Image (cartoon, rainbow, N blue to C red):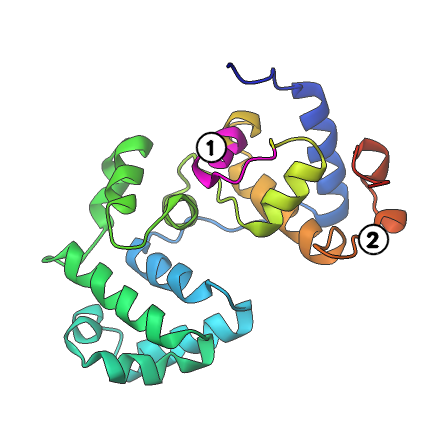
Amino acid sequence: MGRARVDRARVRRIRARLRELYGVPCMPPHGAPLDELVLTVLSQSTNDRNRDVAYLRLRERFGGSWEAVRAAPVEEVEAVIRPGGISKVKSLRIQQILEAIGDPLTLDDLAGLPVEEARARLVALPGVGRKTAACVLLFSFGMRDVPVDTHVSRVGTRLALLPEDPNFDRLHDAMLEITPRGAELEFHVNLLRHGRRTCHAQRPACRECALRRMCPSRFA
């Protein structure tokens, strides 16, 4: 079964309204893919503040060396990142990723690859899925990929921009299809902001929502 045709005009209207609400985010690619990868692992099942505390503690404890993180006892890494939550799982996952990358311990060469090849390299690493890979490619290099987290998925589904599909690989494909070229960062960040501020999981503020007239789920 083929995908439904994307209503480009409707996407443009929603994008424009989100820009009115939240502006256009300015986050130039930082060119540090391994840092971004570890940061994204630490972001799982926690808030931004706890993620950042765990990341800074990790960098300070090991002098900014990922080789030192890789070689450390896993119990030591776990203790350092404990403020980020589920530290037992994350510490093991980070070390598994660093081991799998090998030497030299870098992902800088991804910058010269096509998006599909760079993505395949990332998702071959232990526990790295499409969302994590998209974060690395978009935020590090400005590549054409769009992370679909729970907020983006929820808002996109309620707006009927994305299909109701539990498969996040297919959701990422659908998100890429509807996102105008050059708007990858903007669309991701603004949908995420709308999910956090208005389109909440349990009690969406539909009456106050600036997108309510474009949202088929507003009375649901």
- Residue 135 in view: yes
Name, please, the residue furthest toward the left. Answer: 103
Q: Which residue is rendered at x = 52% and y = 25% of the image?
A: 177
Mark 1 Cα shell of 10 Å, populated few (<14), some (14-19), many (≥20): some
Span highlighted in magenta in the image: 164-175
Do the residues under discs 1 and 2 have CB atoms within 8 angstroms?
no
What residue type is disc 1 on?
Arg
| Dot label at residue 170 | 1
Badge 1 marks a residue whose secondary structure is helix
Secondary structure predominantly adopted by residues drawn in magenta: helix
> Which x, y percent locates residue 131?
43, 47
Residue 210, image quadrant: top right
> Which x, y percent locates residue 93?
29, 64
Q: Which residue is rendered at x = 65% and y = 20% of the image?
A: 8
What residue type is disc 2 on?
Ala
Whichever of callouts 1 and 2 sits on the residue coming sooner in the sequence is 1
- Residue 24 in view: no
What is the C-alpha distance between the residues marked 1 and 2? 28 Å
> Which x, y percent locates residue 165?
55, 35
Could you say which is closer to the camera, residue 12 or residue 177?
177
Q: Where 154 falls versus 30 (above or below)?
A: above
Q: Which residue is rendered at x = 31% and y = 31% of the image?
A: 116
